[in-house]
Amino acid sequence: MTQLPALAIDALAIDAIAGFDGSIAVFLPADGKLDQGARRVNRLTRGALARFAESDAFGKLKPGESTELAWPAGLVASSILVVRLEAKPDTEALRKAGAALGKARGKKDVLALAGARKGLGDLLLGALLRSYAFKECRSGEAAEPEAGAIRVMVTNPEALEAQMNAVRAVAEGVYFTRDLVNLPANRLTTEDFANRLAALGDLGLEVEVLEEDRLAELGMGMLLGVGHGSESPSKVVVMRWNGGGKEAPLALVGKGVVFDTGGISIKPAAGMEDMTMDMGGAGVVAGVMKTLALRKAAANVVGLVGLVENMPDGRAQRPGDIVTSMKGDTVEVINTDAEGRLVLGDVMWYAQERFKPSGMVDLATLTGAIIVALGHDNAGVFSNDDAFANGFLAAAKAEGEGAWRMPIGPNYAELLKSEKADVKNVGTRWGGAVTAAEFLHRFVKDDTPWIHLDIAGVAQPAKPPAWAPKGASGWGVMALDRMIRDRFEG
């Protein structure tokens, strides 16, 4: 799996600046005022930094944005990265500034002269997140050379280092999610996925893998029906973090369709290769659980993922089939490409039956309809509990991860009525993301606060956010970790 880049936190040593071989980053507010480190860079470059701070080019930079000054005279460094950052920046600006460091890393180190700035934990998180590069499937010959380290000089290195366990834990969780989502289906089979999750037991998680015979005993007919056409066995993986007291756990449930052809209702060929990311919900759950274990979270959380592959085959589920859920409801399968809700419904019911959670959040790359509604900037948030939903929305906003509340209601549920079974797995053409949420709502007990996150547009966005390269974003790890810290710890 992808490793975090080397990160060194040192005391500010201005005499070392002149001989540093790499890229040097300085942070300037809108008025161009230079701090101690920037003043030394300015002196060594004979005033070049101050002249740039007075230029129109610097004036056009937005908070967190940067410009590179290449091959500065008076320095061994190959470039100076000038980052616009106010004295009291917000989280978004800090992470964007950090992302500029991560992006600037070349074969050599990048040195950030951060001095006494506030919020450096967020800045370094941005640097770590943007430094991610997926190389697991490259051969040795094709792989890019290892990039340099991130170095930061500050006036109080001990205080910054004290924050870094939590920062590294979040970054590790995001990296884990990105790796899982980026992996192709021939490398991330249901078996391999389960093995990677089982390895999290080394961090203190209790991990249990439920195989097909156990799922059949439990009556998970919806989930098992999705995987009938695949050679890869369907599984449910349960990950428990018991860091709190005796309180009921929060349950996180993820859709883990390692590849989705659409089954018999097969998808068009164009773009089908992107369906390697249809396990994105399970990937986020895995990343959050890893983060909680690494930072020793003082909360009880259980993560459950349903791992299946949706393939066409002589044994595959057909349109018109009627399956029975673990809850006992019968479901008429109108479209085999609406499979994620079948997987989630059974796992959600199991989570409630076994763990009696204080709340439940499910995540899935569930519908194209949510992308039509919200694009790639926001996940859809559906909930039966306003306080729970608002808590998540506040956490997502604080972490800069886009999320937007969507409606649910009985009129949408009416669209799922079946003449042959208790319910259909799809409604009409209209409100597709909402009827999908209402299908899931059917498998939520009345006393369970619940949030459904449709992450189809944000798991692998067309335009990556500032803190991520192209590919899997890892969206949701930071927001859910923040919500757990704010609402379920202490």
Image (tube, grey):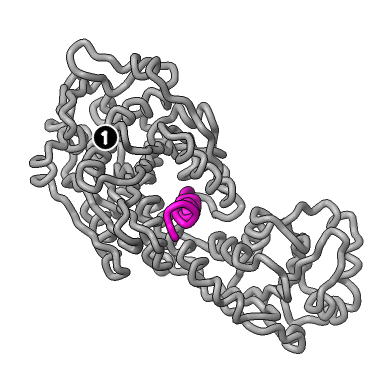
Label 1 packing within 10 angstroms: few (<14), some (14-19), many (20+)? many
Q: Position of residue 31 (x, y in %)?
A: 88, 61
Location of residue 451 with respect to 200 vertically, above or below: above
The vertical placement of 119 against 373, above or below, is below
Q: Residue at x 78, y 81 (%)?
A: 75
461 or 247, nearer to the observer: 247
Residue found at x 64% / y 68%: 120
Q: Residue furthest bottom?
A: 15
- Can you give x and y, in whole percent of width and height, for residue 301 in the image? 34, 55
* Residue 253 horizontal side relative to residue 36, left or right: left
The amino acid type, in three-letter code, at marker 1 is: Gly
In terms of secondary structure, what is the magenta stretch mainly?
helix
User: Dot 1: what SS?
Assistant: helix
Tell me the residue at 29%/27% (across/down).
442
The reply to whether the magenta stretch includes residue 481 is yes
Question: Which quarter of the figure is the N terminus placed in?
Answer: bottom left
Question: x, y percentage for residue 321?
Answer: 16, 22
Q: Which residue is mark 1?
A: 345
Q: Is residue 337 visible?
A: no
Q: Which residues are magenta?
A: 473-490
- Give the quadrant of the C terminus: bottom left
Magenta region includes residue 179? no
Left or right: 448, with 110 as reference point: left
Closer-to-camera residue (416/309)? 416
Q: What residue lies at 49% left-to-right and 29% top-to-bottom?
A: 406
